[in-house]
Image (cartoon, rainbow, N blue to C red):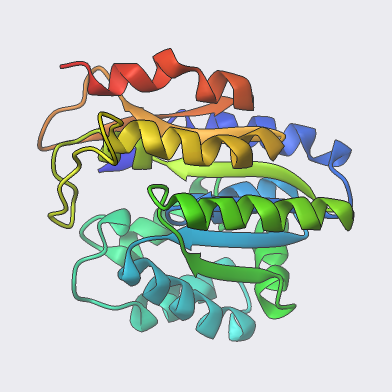
Amino acid sequence: MRECAGADECIAAVRDAAPMAPARALHVGWGSFRNLDLAAAARVAALLLLDVNEHQFRVWRAVAQVLPDSRSAADFIDRVAVALPNEPRLRQFGTDTRRWLRGDLERPGSWLFEGDPDGFRRVRELFMSGQVATAALDLRDGAGMARLEAELGLAAHDGWQLETTYVSNIPWMLAQPVGFFGEQHGTLGGERSVLEAAREHLAPVAMRSRRVVSAMHLRADASADNLQWQTELLNPADFLEPARWRVLTTP
């Protein structure tokens, strides 16, 4: 499972636009380390990490635990590889966590890229200064998503701007009959599908964002045993276009 195709190009575009970002720039995202890549590239001042998978929060706790004492990206990798849970296997890091992360030392789009240590420094400072928050929030949870949108509205009054929103491949997952955790993806009230509900719940949040990054579409060369998603940088209106979501349910 990979969300790498197109990711570095998206991150480069976000980085190029970063000098125009306001001082109080915010990143909100679901999923894994791609959020840290985007937060570093956008030079945000705060970061909200969301997910529904309890094991993802174990990853974030391990990151927060070892970052303060990490002198460099390579040092961080050595420390976090030990601190990360071994079971269940963390799919986001492939079969070998340390090897997977060390590959990011050479990837220009990564916050761990050794060629530009500013990304590592920025993310480390965000964690150390208490500007990183985590919360469990499901796109299917209408009330929870409404609370998030209300909080973002209050933040906007205080001068915060939502620069980037990352939704990973969650829309694709919700379009499948059965989720990765065995949950059934049927309908929510009447004929409204889980996917349709998620889009409706996400729309007010996405429209507050300057840009949306998603990996919701499988690449043409993806196979059942090698899932590959295409990462895209979109304006909110294009991201929410019904046809973009409808194709996820097309056989």
Q: Quadrant of residue 250?
A: top left
**Across the whole image, how many numbered discs are drawn on residues?**
0
Work out whether residue 155 or residue 222 is closer to the camera in this orientation and state it. 155
Q: Quadrant of residue 58?
A: bottom left
- Residue at position x 61%, y 21% in the image: 237
- Residue at position x 84%, y 42% in the image: 21
Percent across and percent down for residue 109 are: 56, 42
Residue placed furthest toward the top: 243
Could you tell me if residue 111 is visible in this image? no
- Residue at position x 25%, y 55% in the image: 94
Q: Is residue 9 above or below residue 197?
A: above
- Residue at position x 68%, y 46% in the image: 41
Work out whether residue 213 or residue 154 is closer to the camera in this orientation and state it. 154
Q: Is residue 224 above or below residue 117?
A: above
Q: Left of 172 or right of it: where is 180?
A: left
Q: Left of 96 or right of it: where is 40?
A: right
Q: Left of 57 or right of it: where is 175?
A: left
Percent across and percent down for residue 184 are: 15, 47
Could you tell me if residue 16 is visible in this image? yes
Q: Is residue 78 above or below residue 192?
A: below
Q: Left of 143 or right of it: where is 164?
A: right
Q: Which quarter of the image is occupied by the C terminus?
A: top left
Percent across and percent down for residue 13 are: 67, 30
Work out whether residue 157 or residue 76 is closer to the camera in this orientation and state it. 157
Work out whether residue 199 or residue 231 is closer to the camera in this orientation and state it. 199
Percent across and percent down for residue 181 are: 17, 57
Q: Is residue 195 above or below residue 132?
A: above
Q: Which quarter of the image is occupied by the N terminus?
A: top left
